[in-house]
């Protein structure tokens, strides 16, 4: 059994929160550059500004976007790890609170959806833990802005709806709210599980690197089909028209009840910030 101090987790999370908010991942930046090379007029100008914004944010250590997001953590916790000190939830939340205050990242979390009092440290974070074999902890941070989160959607379809029903629902969600989510978008799709798990499945899809292919040929084909149809909507960068409505579509699937067909779409803006640390 390997012992890891909770203070190590807190310090790692502090760094993750800052570095992820300052730096656009290379795969996302490259995808924006490729789209800029194909676009013309206003769409090209917007993508060029996004590239310049990413360059300045990284150089000056300032956030890529004023909305530094809800703090989402996807953690693979080794079964041979014992954490000493605080539990992992407190360790992560302490790191979030420290980083958002110390680095002047915007605190966007309210303690109650109706009374709306800000917690002033961007906690609590959304923490999803998978127990895996091994003696390490892999922590991935995904800050997600409110505009793109509000554009996400979930529907419990009839099993007879099939792929066409799922596709119609996803395209409808993007037509309705995609322009408000700062396109070009990254689209995470969850299919299967149940009402509680399909949303997490969709959001977790956003962790895949742009350019990666689905491990299943069937779903790789569906991702390509969806991306083409989304870009044909002509929503374009920032909703002002153009082909670059989305940079990627990622589908994740899990088993479900014979009478159910849950589908969720987690829409992410072009500022798809994410970073991983291994302890």
Image (cartoon, rainbow, N blue to C red):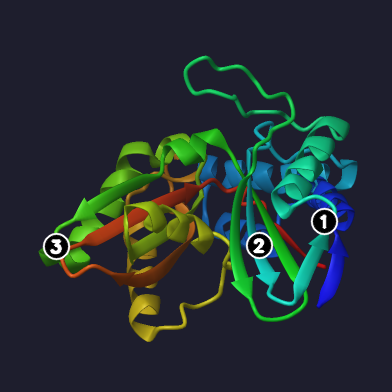
The quadrant the N terminus occupies is bottom right
Q: CA distance from mark 3 to mark 2?
A: 34 Å
Could you classify mark 1 by the number of other residues whose Cα lies within 10 Å: few (under 14), some (14-19), or many (20 or more)? many
Residue position marked by numbered label 3 in the rendering: 161
Residue at position x 83%, y 50% in the image: 10
Using the image as rendered, state which of residue 45 and residue 155 is in the foreground. Answer: 155
Residue 219: percent from the left, percent from the top?
A: 36, 76
Q: CA distance from mark 1 to mark 3?
A: 44 Å
Residue position marked by numbered label 1 in the rendering: 9
Residue 253: percent from the left, percent from the top?
A: 38, 70
The answer to whether residue 240 is seen in the rendering is no
Could you classify mark 2 by the number of other residues whose Cα lies within 10 Å: few (under 14), some (14-19), or many (20 or more)? many
Q: Earlier in the sequence, mark 1 or mark 2?
A: 1
Residue at position x 20%, y 62% in the image: 260
Using the image as rendered, state which of residue 195 and residue 190 is in the foreground. Answer: 195
Left or right of residue 101: residue 209: left
Q: Secondary structure at mark 2?
A: strand
Residue position marked by numbered label 2 in the rendering: 75
Residue at position x 60%, y 47% in the image: 47
Q: Which mark is residue 194?
A: none
Quarter occupied by residue 216: bottom left
């Amino acid at each position: 059994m390997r012992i890891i101090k909770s203070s190590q987790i807190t310090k790692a999370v502090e760094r993750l929160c800052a570095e992820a908010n300052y730096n656009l991942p290379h795969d996302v930046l490259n995808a924006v550059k490729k789209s800029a090379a194909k676009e013309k007029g206003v769409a090209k100008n917007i993508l060029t500004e996004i590239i310049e914004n990413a360059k300045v944010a990284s150089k000056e250590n300032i956030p890529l976007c004023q909305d530094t997001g809800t703090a989402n953590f996807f953690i693979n916790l080794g079964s041979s790890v014992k954490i000493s000190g605080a539990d992992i939830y407190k360790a992560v939340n302490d790191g979030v609170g420290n980083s958002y205050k110390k680095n002047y990242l915007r605190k966007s979390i309210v303690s109650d959806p109706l009374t709306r009092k800000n917690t002033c440290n961007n906690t609590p974070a959304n923490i999803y833990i998978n127990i895996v074999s091994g003696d390490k902890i892999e922590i991935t941070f995904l800050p997600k802005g409110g505009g793109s989160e509000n554009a996400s959607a979930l529907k419990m379809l009839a099993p007879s709806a099939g792929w066409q029903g799922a596709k119609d629902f996803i395209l409808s969600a993007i037509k309705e709210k995609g322009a408000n989510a700062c396109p070009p978008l990254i689209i995470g799709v969850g299919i299967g599980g149940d009402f509680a798990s399909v949303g997490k499945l969709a959001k977790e899809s956003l962790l895949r690197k742009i350019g990666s292919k689905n491990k299943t040929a069937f779903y790789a084909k569906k991702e390509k089909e969806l991306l083409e149809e989304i870009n044909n909507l002509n929503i374009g960068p920032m909703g002002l028209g153009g082909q670059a409505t989305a940079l990627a579509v990622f589908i994740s699937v899990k088993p479900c009840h014979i009478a159910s067909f849950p589908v969720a779409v987690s829409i992410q803006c072009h500022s798809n910030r994410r970073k991983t640390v291994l302890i």
